[in-house]
Amino acid sequence: MSGHSKWATTKHKKAAIDAKRAKSFAKLIKNIEVAARAGGADMSGNPALELAVTKAKKSSVPNDNIDRAIKRGAGLTGEVVDYTEIIYEARGPQGSALLIECLTDNKNRAASEVRVAITRNGGTIADPGSVAYLFARKGLVNLPKKDLTEDDLLMAVLDAGAEEVKESGESFEIHSEPSDLRAVVAALEEAGIEYETDEIEFVPSMHVELDAEGARKFLKLADAIEELDDVQNVYSNADISAEVMAELEND
C-alpha cells in the first residue's frame, strides 16, 4: 500500500510483507511499463522510467523482470501496453474518506470491481470531487527516527524545497511539493541520511479518528480494495491509534 501519515503507520503495522510482495511487484512492473511507454526505454532521457526502476530495485524486483517490463512498455517486444489512470472516491465508516488510484487496461472492469469491493464491505461510492478536496498531492519521504531530530532533518532539506517535517510514530515524514521531491531526496543522500520511501502521494488535510468498531470495518474495506489487480494505491484520512490497533490484534 501507499499512503502515509496516520494511515501509513497503520498499514506498516498490519502489512503481511510476504503475502503482499507479489502484488507489490506487479504494481512496480506496471509503473515501469507506463513510464517506458510514455518516454522510451532509455533511462538517461526518461526520468520517470529511471525513478520507476529505482523503486523496483529498492523493493528487490528481479532485474530480468525489470528489463522485460522496460522492453514491453517501450514496444520492443511487439506487445501493446496501454494503461489508463483512474481515481475513485469512497466513504468508509465513521466519516473516513478514501481515494483509490487505479492503473488499468480495462476501465469497465476496474470500475465494476472497485464498486463491488466498496459496497460489499460497508463503504459507499462518493461523487467525484466530494472526497478529493480533502487531499493534496504532495511529495512525501518517510524515514526512521534513529538518532535524528526534527532540526537535523530541517537543516538538511529546507533549502531543497521541503515544506515541513512531521513525526509519525517511530518515523519522520518530510512533505514537499511534488516537483521538489527529487531535490529533497538528493539533499538527504548528500547529508548521508537514510530514508525508507519517497513517493508522490495524496496527503489528507485532516484526519478522522476511528474507534475499534470503525477500525475493524475500515481495515476490511481497505484490504478488499487493495487486493484488486487494477488498484495501485489507496489513500485515506483514517487515523487508527496504537491503542485501537492493539485491541484489534487481541481479537
Image: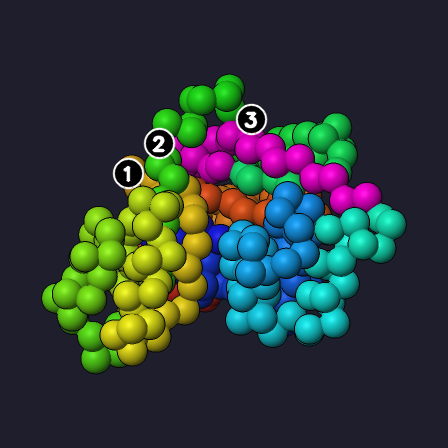
Q: Residue at x 29, y 73 (%)?
A: 190
| Residue marked by disc 3 | 125
Q: Quadrant of residue 27?
A: bottom right
Whole-percent x, y for residue 47 in the image? 52, 54
- In terms of depth relative to the viewer, which is nearer, 226 or 160? 160
Q: Residue at x 35, y 31 (%)?
A: 134
Query: In the image, is residue 84 part of the stretch drawn in magenta?
Result: yes
* Cα distance in 3D space between marks 1 and 3: 20 Å
Left or right relative to 171: residue 118: right
Q: Decide which of tag 3 and tag 2 comes sooner along the chain.
A: 3
Q: Decide which of tag 1 and tag 3 comes sooner along the chain.
A: 3
Query: In the image, is residue 42 part of the stretch drawn in magenta?
Result: no
Do the CB atoms of the residues marked 1 and 2 lie less than 8 Å apart?
Answer: yes
- In terms of depth relative to the viewer, which is nearer, 138 or 2? 138
Residue type, mark 1 in image: Met
Above or below, 19 against 126 in this view is below
Q: Which mark is residue 206?
A: 1
| Chain part drawn in magenta | 80-99
